Image: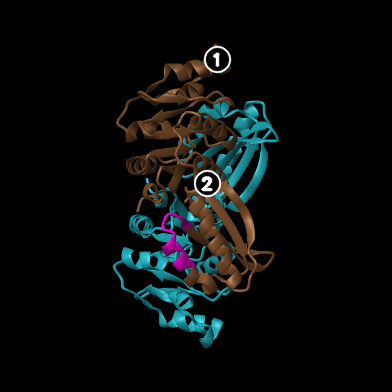
Chain colours: A cyan, B brown
């Protein structure tokens, strides 16, 4: 079942995080949760994330596979001026488009650095696949770009976020994903059967069960997601009853926020 | 180029993070950086991470592709007792092995919950692909398991970490990845050419360049990685000279820690 089928009226997306620093564990990927929440609020559901190294072959493969399967692909990382920035040439290869100097991008960079400030490394940031549309970068000038259904953004969170803000104003919105989250202290294995029955009853709602440790105690977060508010509330009310039946008092964690999957 | 070729004497690995809660953005994936650093210290280099939903089809596809390409695959999530825990049946399907009650796992669960405490949901956690070897869970009893080159662990960080500790004592270690990190305040586009030349000179070292914002200022982290300490120190010394040539004073961020890629 595709994510699209799970939530009618939404768009499907995948994310590709490009960068050795994330795979090495040195840098925590904070782009994925930020993007996933932002997208969900616009009715775009993230169905898969891949973290790949600064390696052309792996980037090309991930982008080709995911762009064929999802309506949108969002990438972050690898569009800077250094030797390890290979995202633009990877996109050119993935779509069989020549890599060329994008005149509009070059002009943005020249305006930012001054004509005397342009060097080969800065000019490199204007090299993009033929036909690319630009994503403005209000922070450091070097733009992202769009090829087919792939949205290529910077890896630095502050720049990526500004680019996403721009994109979310320019992409047709889907039905926002609504979610309710309820916490309790029951063990999963105590309410698993009831949850299965509840999931069967509400096929339009996705019910997730997530055990966790907090302050040394095991707890359980139950998350309900869907696009229809009334059904979501009904299912949440039933879940609350189930928890009380087992002698626990549920706590609402966050209500009616946008979430996804 | 494969990750194995990048670092002689190391093993290659991929990670599959299973769980809608991560894709939804509600939960930050902290398992990836923890595992990547732990693995790097044991000479295992992570070459790709995929975050997939609690969906059998997508889990099967990711595991089949990655287990064919990497020497190890480590998965977290989806081995609990609830309806959205579909990892065990996905592994059975991926490897064409029947899903069956693992007698040893059942006995661990029975010991933990008591014979009268066993219910169908708890028994579900003993269902594993035929031939699976167990990964002990010292926290909540329900074990992970190994099928072929795939290591299936819990998603709760504290449990995953205990399982990884066990695995790292039982997997032959490769050459640890050593890394040096140097910070400066230069712009990437100022030293990009020198970095390219440095990378060409030291083919056994991977040099990464990562711009960031801290306290509102743009900064640059430069990370060098490799398995040969002497070459790593030489390349680091040269990098420090390059930064000084451009009028900046480098700061050592962390020296001789294990890191990867």
Q: Say if mark 2 contacts mark 1, CB within 8 Å.
A: no
Taking the image as shown, residue A165 lies to the left or right of residue A98, namely: right
Residue receiving disc 2? B22
In the picture, which quadrant includes the N terminus of chain A?
top left
Letter of the chain that mark 2 sits on in the rendering: B
Q: Earlier in the sequence, mark 2 or mark 1?
A: 2
Residue at 49% from the left image edge and 46% from the top image edge? B177
How many numbered marks, from 0 up? 2
The single residue placed furthest to the bottom in the displayed view is A115
- Label 2: few (<14), some (14–19) or many (≥20) C-alpha neighbours in 10 Å: many
Indicate whether A83 appears above or below B21.
Answer: below
Which type of secondary structure does the marked residue at label 1 adopt? helix
Residue range of the region highlighted in magenta in the rendering: B195-206
Residue at 56% from the left image edge and 74% from the top image edge? A140
Indicate whether A205 appears above or below A52.
Answer: above
Front residue of A10 and A218: A218
Which type of secondary structure does the marked residue at label 2 adopt? helix
Taking the image as shown, residue A132 lies to the left or right of residue B176, namely: left
């Amino acid at each position: 079942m595709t994510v699209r089928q799970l939530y009618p009226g939404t768009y499907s997306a995948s994310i590709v995080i490009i960068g050795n620093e994330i795979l090495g564990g040195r840098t925590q990927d904070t782009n994925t949760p930020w993007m996933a929440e932002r997208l969900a609020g616009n009715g775009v559901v993230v169905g898969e994330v891949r973290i790949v190294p600064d390696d052309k072959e792996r980037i090309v493969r991930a982008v080709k596979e995911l762009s064929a399967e999802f309506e949108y692909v969002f990438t972050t990382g690898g569009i800077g001026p250094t030797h390890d920035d290979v995202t633009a040439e990877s996109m050119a290869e993935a779509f069989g488009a020549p890599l060329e100097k994008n005149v509009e991008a070059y002009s943005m960079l020249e305006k930012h650095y001054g004509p005397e400030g342009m060097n080969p490394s800065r000019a490199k940031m204007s090299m993009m696949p033929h036909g690319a549309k630009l994503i403005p970068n209000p922070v450091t000038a070097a733009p992202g770009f769009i090829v087919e259904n792939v949205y290529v953004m910077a890896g630095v969170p502050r720049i990526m976020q500004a680019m996403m803000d721009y994109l979310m104003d320019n992409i047709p919105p889907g039905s926002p994903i609504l979610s309710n989250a309820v916490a309790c202290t029951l063990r999963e294995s105590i309410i698993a059967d009831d949850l299965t029955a509840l999931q069967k009853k509400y096929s339009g709602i996705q019910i997730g069960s997530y055990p966790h440790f907090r302050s040394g105690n095991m707890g359980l977060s139950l998350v309900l997601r869907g696009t229809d508010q009334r059904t979501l509330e009904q299912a949440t009310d039933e879940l609350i009853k189930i928890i009380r039946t087992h002698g626990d008092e549920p706590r609402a964690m966050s209500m009616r926020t946008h979430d996804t999957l």
